[in-house]
Amino acid sequence: MKVALFFFLVASQLPALPNAVLGALAQHESPLNGQDVTDVLLASGAWDGSQSLPGDWQADAGVAGAGSAYLMARPKVFGVDALLVRALHRDENLEELQITFADAGSFFGYLDRRLPGGMDRKEAIAQVQQRIDQKKADFSKFYADTSETLVSRLTGVDKRPRSAKRGRTRDLRAQFNEYQHKESGLIISLLDAPDRLLRVSIRKKETEVKSWLDTSEEKLGVSERLKALAEKVTRTGRGDLVLNGVEVVPQGYRPYCGLNTLVMVARYFGLHLDEDWLAVAGKFQNTGSAAGSDMLGLYRSVAKEAKFNLNRTSRYDHETVRRSIRAGMPVIVWRRWNQARDQLHTRVSRNFANKGDALYERPHEEVLPSKKKRSPLHASVIIGYNDERKEIIFLESWEGKSSPRRMPVSEIVHTADLTFSFRP
């Protein structure tokens, strides 16, 4: 089932916010920028712990006890300019390196729909389509040239790559070509999703994985996993019942709130997924929006890959959410958004964080965002609630929104379009 919905920020509010990670890298001066670091990344010392990886690294949301960080530099790897180099460590040992060379989400961002004045509707539609077509052509050429060069360099490493897959769920299954680096014995896996994502992963040969679920989670039974999740629930002295361990994965200036919130929950459940691969699996189009993607199918597939079930309802039921939170299960809600309410959430949330006691007044329905007002659709992750204050506690994937936020239960009841709750 496809959804023709737009997940987005108000473009006029954040006109220059890039991908949260790549934007920081573009501004960061590093001696590694433009330098080829292939030999260092493949050196045995990096993998046996005797040698540190070069450069400065910024922590990212980890998975199931494995820490994640990305390199604050834009080097070359295999002689090709890298967009992002990400390292996964477990117990201080390097477990995997991911190098992204092309990513449609970062290239397209939000489509700029601002047009010169004086155009009629037909001219405006034609102008927007022309912009889309030009960006598609530019990215297709960049992708094809980069892929051709990278495959040529990897063929020099191993002329007979093997085919491999990762993902037990059909819609999340990724197809790789695996090249073995003879000197180090490392396996170099190439993920080539035409016109969407070009990425290389490097692992030790003995750490081959078939599922996106972390090996530590694969070994546990359902009851053990549920017990571990329930132990993440904390009650604070101010009445909050909240989950620990759901980390924000910033979406930056991309129409990815529905994806990034899903990644936040997926990683909490122990899945090694990211929004760029989910955009491929969810059939995102290169249009600067989420329109036409199979988001609902993607949500089901992620739940299945985590070995859970997914309930989806077209309304918000607070008692269901309370049960989910008590069980250690976050809830994703697609809701109608507007700037005035968002600013109010910020003020009340900051007041509470600073030991204040400001409360929401019960909002009048006519001032709330809604379908009828064509308010934009936005995704958030509910991680807690406060019965005394009659609030939910939620996280956003927007840049700069890493602190928990608060909203009246009466508001989420009115503004929710779809609610996704996970269960065994």
Image (cartoon, grey):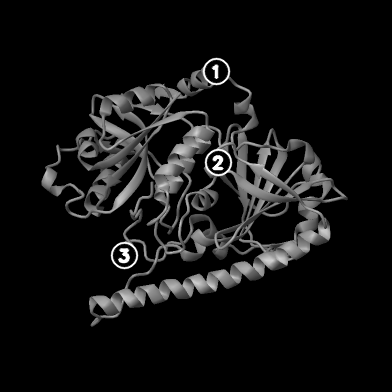
- State which tag comes first along the sequence, 2 or 1: 2
Residue 110: quadrant of the picture = bottom left
Report the front residue among 337 and 126: 126
What amino acid is found at the position of numbered circle 1 in the picture?
A: Glu
x and y, in percent, of residue 57 in the image: 63, 50
Label pair 2/1, CB-CB below 8 angstroms: no
Circle 3 is placed at which residue position? 12
Spatial CA distance of label 2 from label 3 is: 39 Å
- Residue 170 circle label: 2
Spatial CA distance of label 2 from label 1 is: 26 Å
- Label 1 packing within 10 angstroms: few (<14), some (14-19), many (20+): few
Point out the frontmost of discs 2 and 1: 2
- Residue 342 circle label: none
Residue drawn at x 35%, y 50% as measured from the top left: 3
Examine the rendering and report whether any part of residue 389 can be seen. yes
x and y, in percent, of residue 283 in the image: 48, 53
Q: Please indicate whether residue 201 sits to the left or right of residue 298 in the image.
A: right
Residue 6: quadrant of the picture = bottom left
As displayed, is residue 91 above or below residue 101? above
Point out the frontmost of discs 2 and 3: 2
Circle 1 is placed at which residue position? 224
What amino acid is found at the position of numbered circle 2 in the picture?
A: Arg
Residue drawn at x 57%, y 19% as measured from the top left: 221
x and y, in percent, of residue 86 in the image: 63, 50
